[in-house]
Image (tube, rainbow, N blue to C red):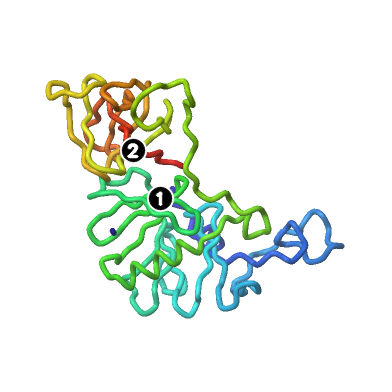
Amino acid sequence: MRLLLPVAALFVLAACTPVASPAAGTTSPTAASPSASPTPTVSPLPTVRPTFAGLPGLTPMRHPGFPGLVFLVDANRWADDLQAGSSPADPNLFLQYKSNPTCRLEAVSDTKIPVPALIDLEVMRGRVFHVFEYPGYSLYESRRVYFRLVGVDDLECQTVLETLLADVVDASEFAGGATPTAHATPAPSLGGAFACDALPPLLRPGETAYIGDSGVWLRGTPELGPNNRIKLFPKHAPVLVDIRDGPVCASGYAYWQVTVAPIGGSGESYSGWMAESNALTYVLFDWNP
C-alpha cells in the first residue's frame, strides 16, 4: 500500500504556529474567562508552542495547506518546516521526522495530481482516506484535502505518518464541538422501486464511485456478452466512475450509465455502462461515503 496556491512567507510563518487549547466551558478558544469581552482582541500569534493540557506531550498545530484540521504532534519526534530550517516561502512543507529527515508530511498545492499507480481506501478512526500510490510517496485524500506522505517505502516512516493522520481532528471538534459522524454503509437509495436479482443499488445518479472489488467491464449496452465490451478495468484501477443514469437490470446485474476518467484528469475518458452489483457482491462503491 502504499494537491493550495502559494502564499506569502509571512502568512505561512503565522499559519504554521500551533493552536492553543480551548479553555474548559467556553465556546471560543481565545476566551480567557466567563467575564471576557464577547469581541476578542486581535493579537499576534505566540511563537512558543503551548502543549494541549488534555493530551500530555502532544502539541496542537495547524498548517494553511490543511484547512480546518488540527494535528496533534509529539515535538520530541517531529520538527516543523521552520524548526528544520526550510524556507517558509514553500507552503507545502510541514512536518519532518527528526530521526529520518527524508520522512515527511506535506501539503499539496495543486489538485491536478498525476495518475497514480493504483488506489486504495483506508478508514482510520472514522475518517475515510483515499490512497494514491506513487514511487517513493503516497497521497492520502480525505474530504478534498490532500496529504503527501514522503518516504513511505520505509515501513517505519509509513507507520509514523499514518499515525499522524489517524490523530488529526477537525478544528471544530478540537474547540469542543460535536465529533463528526463516523463512516457508515449507506442505505439502499432506490428501495423497492428497482426489482432485480442483483444486490440493491447503493449508488445514484450524480455520485462518483470507484472500483473496489474485482475487475469490471465497461460495456456499450447494459447487458452481458462479448460484443459490447469497451474496456476492462481492474480492481482499484486509478479511475473515478461518474454515475450518469440508471440503474438498469439485465442478466442478474444492476447496471449504471457512467463516464470513467483517470484520477488527476490526464488521460482518455470512456462512456458506457458498468455493473454495480450482481446477486453476491458489489463492485462499485461510493467515493465519498
Q: Is residue 272 above or below residue 137?
A: above
Alpha carbon separation for disc pair 1 and 2: 23 Å
Give the percent coordinates (x, y) of residue 207.
Answer: 42, 31
Query: Which residue type carries mark 1?
Result: Glu
In-front residue for pair 20/281: 281
Task: For label 2, count other residues whose C-alpha is less than 10 Å away and answer few (under 14), some (14-19) or many (20+).
Answer: many
Q: Name the residue beneath numbered marker 2.
A: 282
Asked whether residue 237 is in view, the answer is no
In-front residue for pair 275/102: 275
Give the percent coordinates (x, y) of residue 202.
Answer: 43, 33
Task: For label 1, count other residues whose C-alpha is less than 10 Å away and answer few (under 14), some (14-19) or many (20+).
Answer: some
Residue at the extreme left: 227
Q: Name the residue beneath numbered marker 1.
A: 141
Q: Quadrant of the N terminus?
A: bottom left
Q: Is residue 73 above or below residue 225?
A: below
Residue at the location (40% across, 50% down)?
A: 141
Q: Residue 286, labelled with which disc?
A: none
Q: Is residue 117 above or below residue 154?
A: above
Query: Which residue type carries mark 2?
Result: Tyr
Residue at the extreme right: 35
